[in-house]
Image (tube, coloured by chain):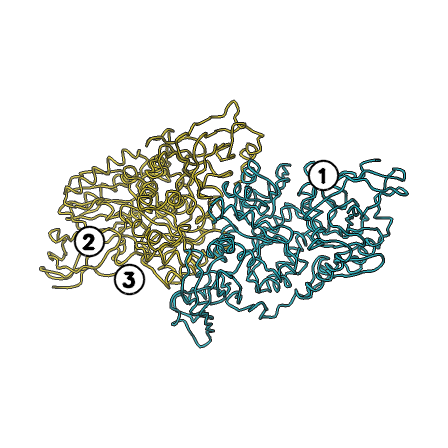
Chain colours: A yellow, B cyan
Amino acid sequence: MLNRAAFDTALGRRPADVIIKNGKVVNVYSGEIWPTDVAISDGVFSSFGDAATLTGPATEVVDAAGYHLVPGLIDTHVHTEASKMSLTSYAKAVLPHGTTAVYSAFDHIACVLGLDGVRLMLDEAAGLPFRVYNPLPCRVPHTIPASTIGGQIGLAEQQAGFGWPEARGIAEVAFDFLIRDEPELFQAIEECEKRRLLAHGDGPGRSGAEVDAMLCAGLRDDHEMTTMEQTVDRIRRGLYVMLRECPVGHNLAPCLRAVTEAGLSARRVALCSDDADATTLVQVGHVDNMVRQIIRSGVDPVTAIQMATLNGAEALRLDDRIGGIGPGRLADFLLVEDLSEFTVHATYVGGQRVAEDGKLTVPLSPPARGPLALSTFSLSPLSAAQLAVRTGLPDGVARALVMETKDGLVRTRREVELPVKDGIVLPDPGQDVLYISVVERFRDTGSRSTAFMSGLGLRQGAMAVSNVADDQNVVCVGADVESMVTAINRVAALRGAQVVARGPEVLAELPLPVAGCMTDADPADVIAAEAELNAAARALGTRVEIPFSFLMFTTITTMPFLSLTDKGLVEYGSFEYLDPVLGGA
Amino acid sequence: MLNRAAFDTALGRRPADVIIKNGKVVNVYSGEIWPTDVAISDGVFSSFGDAATLTGPATEVVDAAGYHLVPGLIDTHVHTEASKMSLTSYAKAVLPHGTTAVYSAFDHIACVLGLDGVRLMLDEAAGLPFRVYNPLPCRVPHTIPASTIGGQIGLAEQQAGFGWPEARGIAEVAFDFLIRDEPELFQAIEECEKRRLLAHGDGPGRSGAEVDAMLCAGLRDDHEMTTMEQTVDRIRRGLYVMLRECPVGHNLAPCLRAVTEAGLSARRVALCSDDADATTLVQVGHVDNMVRQIIRSGVDPVTAIQMATLNGAEALRLDDRIGGIGPGRLADFLLVEDLSEFTVHATYVGGQRVAEDGKLTVPLSPPARGPLALSTFSLSPLSAAQLAVRTGLPDGVARALVMETKDGLVRTRREVELPVKDGIVLPDPGQDVLYISVVERFRDTGSRSTAFMSGLGLRQGAMAVSNVADDQNVVCVGADVESMVTAINRVAALRGAQVVARGPEVLAELPLPVAGCMTDADPADVIAAEAELNAAARALGTRVEIPFSFLMFTTITTMPFLSLTDKGLVEYGSFEYLDPVLGGA
């Protein structure tokens, strides 16, 4: 990357702003540990080797003796909004863990505000010591058939966004869109190729010929692997793979076996978190946690660090800016004492120390929030009757189709018998069959639907949230409609929130005022709220570790085998609406 | 790369055009040898694994049992014009050796015709089964101070060329241009970054802080390394390296030691030939010869092949199109029986066999040549007096500055005493001091200069050529001015040629009518002519293996330590003109 100040420092014409002395660079280019001084000017690495002559009166000299310099870690595919934290709060959470760059489509806020929402995030990013790269969503809504949402992104919006200096391409082109031959999507991919942008893939469960087709459609990578075999399949065919580790998908361990057991080259293996909650990010870690896990699996630390840095930078064609410690690269790096332990001692962005020993060392403030971000919610109070599953069947018993899930991600079919009373098919917490409702929340259209869900294990009460993938409507799961109404109406009153309720009582809540899906609260406060919400949900009977993760993905129609949007229950593959009531017993 | 036909074949909707059965794919992505069938549609790899179901009535099935499928080889930095062959002839020469893609700035023809010359080459390329990628020259003329040439390329021309679909960036940004802070060049690099194009480097002899500066100027790679240390220096700092092997620079062996001895990762190591004559290309080989040499050095064949394919494709950001055998990639590949021998049995481009056992299997014809390509020469006949080195010294002896060279590339200073007669400082073949002249040939301006050269060892006669790097004027070396006049005037009469003469007699010649620097002749005919030219030059006393290589680089001002253009003798570094006559003895 051209930087005139760094260029002048490299040539000895200008003193360095910062010199890091006596450290050992983890050199992801050469694969070595390289003991060298490092000089930085204007936030960019300028010089390696002996930097003594570059010291001027204003040069800050840092003694890194005993530490390795590791390139800043990259999350190559993440929905930062899924953490419920604004970008500022997200940066506060992950900078102490050594993440200095994220690649994020901002499709959550795009569901709310379209391209303006993406722009809001990028403008916020510009004020942070945190690198944010944005491929536009490939399609908003991402649902098939389309659900009711607040914003739209199609080819016209993409053409506008492709003109932004930040443009990188389009994200998560779902295999299901491809095989439906959606003309706009193919045009968007062509447009990316013409503008030298990238089209990123999304092929959950796909293998063999389907992976061939993803590549023939011009897609560059995938992050949806859950097994060694799927990972091998993709690497062999030339897809970059972003191994994922997130609270609802512990995919790293099986996928890493493509390297550790199948013996494939790691050079095209990168890392991502996709969706993670604040508690996991802060307490367990982010990309740093993946690196630790990879090293514990027996992978050489330099190779593990390459996965977290250079490999992803190359996959995303950002290797001239990030992913390595070398001249002309952004001076983002970590100090790590023991590579095999991989505990991040300090994080530097642009040559400035931003975190040390788990704490931020610079103040980060969110931007002032205007009406664009704060006025996205419009939902009148609901009544219990509006959520019930209605039937023409007489009182007695009905057969019903239930979305059953073990992880919140994959929903399989379960058939049960449920009580019918006064034209309503009731949930039955006794056999773990709850109501699940999706309620449109952007324009108070009254569009909503209710079906049945199994797996969460609530015995009473309800949980509701207005931050859900692909949709950003309000999703509520409950054992009874009264609790559900309490929860949903509280979410609406807060203009976006995560709520646990029982009967008329709100047990716990986390307001999400930014675009109805994010908060500017400090990560510590978000974690405290998450703990209260989880505790309240557990008190209602669930044993799921992160109960809200069972609500956040049920609106994704492109994952097998059932999903629910405000328009109804969707069958994966046919993408047709199903009646959750199958008939009389 | 998006290809709808290949996409449809991958999904089983369309039969394959070609199926390659029973081969073993050298998988540069995974690092494995992968036994698999391969299907091809519309010139693009579509499918891997069992391709039986993709066979239709028109499908061509090739049995590759016993062979490896190797990705087509890439020359990542080459001046194809330096071979004196037109692009069509060049493709004929290298396709049988497995080169299917070249990355070439076409700066030779740009010296003649500016951007129109580059366009001519790209239009010719479009008709060939050969992939040609073009970064524009970073600056034409490339000489400091500017010599007299026919075309110009600066920022305005680059801005125009950057709009072409073929645009890749700018080539060979010389370190010397950078440290002179040339504003247009920095603007061109900025423009490349804005348009997501690449700026390639050129740092002969540079090390340490100078390499830092190249990276801080936004340069991506270098191909000028001649030692292990220079190569290590560049890989460590994050420059891609293109190891070079060409007749005048056997740099591969020492540079490869960065991998084999210093133990650095090979992933950012690619290969190039820079400048090579037809005889070497046909008889010794091209990138295939480098692969053989690397394998003989003990490098694993898959790693060696990665250097010749994927690594270069990644360096040039072409890995979505070339550099590997995978879906969505252009179906360019080789059949190779024994990887350790690495003899190319057959070459396929876009799924079509174009060469087998050293012979082309498809006819390639050059385009009709119009006046643009054929009318570039304007030089009136010279007389002997016009070439002499004149002096005000009396008859006797003068001290003179001589360009001495052992390889044609690096010219060092030598001081000698030469006879002075009638105001002329004479050459002295007895002590291997010849005249060297550069004669402007585009607009008959009369601009010319003569100096002294040592190292070639002619005892009599002269050699002249109108194909020389960075300039494309006529360069002539001779033991006497009469022979030189014969040679130069014959070059002019042919409107471009390579000539050996003695006294009034032309001993051998190769006409170069295309832009005055290339021929459409078949490689076999070019080789025959080269053999005659070399034999004639050797009969005149030289023992240099490829005598004309000593003429083709003396006009490059950005290589140490002396050079000659039509304007005079240039000192490297100061870039000032020197008088070759130092004074009386």
Relative image position of residue B409 (x, y in whole percent)? 67, 47
Q: Decide if residue A10 is on the left or right side of residue A511.
A: right
Q: Which amino acid does label 3 sit on?
A: Glu
Q: Distance between the residues labelled 1 and 2?
A: 82 Å
Can you see residue B387? Answer: yes
Could you give the CA–CA distance between mark 2 and mark 3, rounded to whole angstroms? 18 Å
10 Å neighbourhood of mark 3: few (<14), some, or many (≥20)?
Answer: few
Seen as rendered, the residue at the extreme top is A57
For disc 3, the marked residue is A576
- The kind of secondary structure element at disc 3 is loop
Estimate how packed mark 2 is, as few (under 14), some (14 to 19) or many (20 or more) residues with alpha carbons within 10 Å: many
Residue B335 at x, y percent in the picture: 50, 66
Q: How far apart are marks 1 and 3 (CA)?
A: 77 Å
Residue B174 position (above or below residue A348): below
Foreground: disc 1 or disc 2? 1
Which quarter shows the C terminus of chain A? bottom left
List x then y, in percent, for residue A157.
Answer: 44, 50
Have a look at marks 1 and 2 and say if they share a chain. no
Disc 1 versus disc 3: nearer the observer: 1
Q: Are marks 2 and 3 on the same chain?
A: yes
Image coords of residue B244 (percent x, y) = 58, 51
The crowding category of the residue bearing disc 1, from other C-alpha atoms within 10 Å (few below 14, some 14 to 19, many at least 20), is many
The number of numbered badges drawn on the structure is 3
- Discs 2, 3 touching: Cβ within 8 Å: no
Q: Name the residue under label 2.
A: A453
Label of residue B482 in the image:
none
